[in-house]
Image: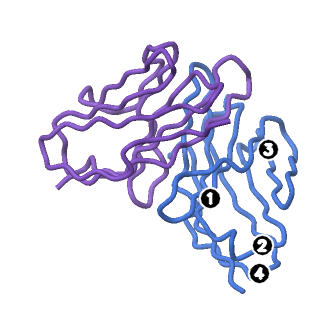
Amino acid sequence: ETGVTQSPTHLIKTRGQQVTLRCSSQSGHNTVSWYQQALGQGPQFIFQYYREEENGRGNFPPRFSGLQFPNYSSELNVNALELDDSALYLCASSFTGTRNNEQFFGPGTRLTVL
Amino acid sequence: QKEVEQNSGPLSVPEGAIASLNCTYSDRGSQSFFWYRQYSGKSPELIMSIYSNGDKEDGRFTAQLNKASQYVSLLIRDSQPSDSATYLCAVRLSGGYNKLIFGAGTRLAVHP
């Protein structure tokens, strides 16, 4: 059973640029959630994808967008990067269809915006 | 009022002692509760999930849930220096999709 993978591991961008982060879900899972974790804080929910559609969104502006592909992998896109977007971006994989759908995190992508 | 609250710590315990980590939540309808461990520079790792009132034990870890008091805790018995990490409490809100709300985490330091 393969775990959740994310790429790239680290990324440095400048303000105003655009970035795409990628996530492959755990084998057998069909749902991907994205979280942003600032230093010293708990992860904050960005959005979730299920059946290739956005299935819920947290308090993030529209410049945060995503996709889910037929193989359940997912992308997070952030446009017009701001300094405050510097954070650890976490992808969590789960299976929608059972009551106890635990979420398992990938290793994360550390984004630095200069 | 924050949706999920934890004491930020650090909680310092000697090796071999019991570490007790606490979490309160505001959504009375929440049904699912999780504890994640996060080492510095790493991603969160799920260590316990609990859905019913009472205790759930897994090895050295015991999760306790009291829905009436909106309180969930994690006990770590025989604490080891390798348990030193930040412990995140997460709550799945009632209704809708599988969105987790996290507390800010409690930093645990186990000293030899």
Q: What residue type is labelled 3?
A: Asn
Apparent colour of chain A = purple
Determine the CA span between mark 3 and mark 1. Answer: 19 Å
Q: What residue type is labelled 1?
A: Tyr
Residue in the foreground of this view, choosing between A98 and A45: A98
At which x and y percent is residue A109? 39, 48
Q: Mark 4 lies on which chain?
A: B
Residue A28 location, quadrant:
top right
At which x and y percent is residue A94? 61, 29
Question: What residue does disc 3 label?
Answer: B66
At which x and y percent is residue A17? 14, 40
Determine the CA span between mark 1 and mark 4. Answer: 17 Å
Determine the CA span between mark 3 and mark 4. Answer: 28 Å
Give the secondary structure at mark 2.
loop
Residue shown at 78%/35% (left/top)? B51
Q: Which circle's residue, 1 or 2, is located before the other in the chain?
A: 2
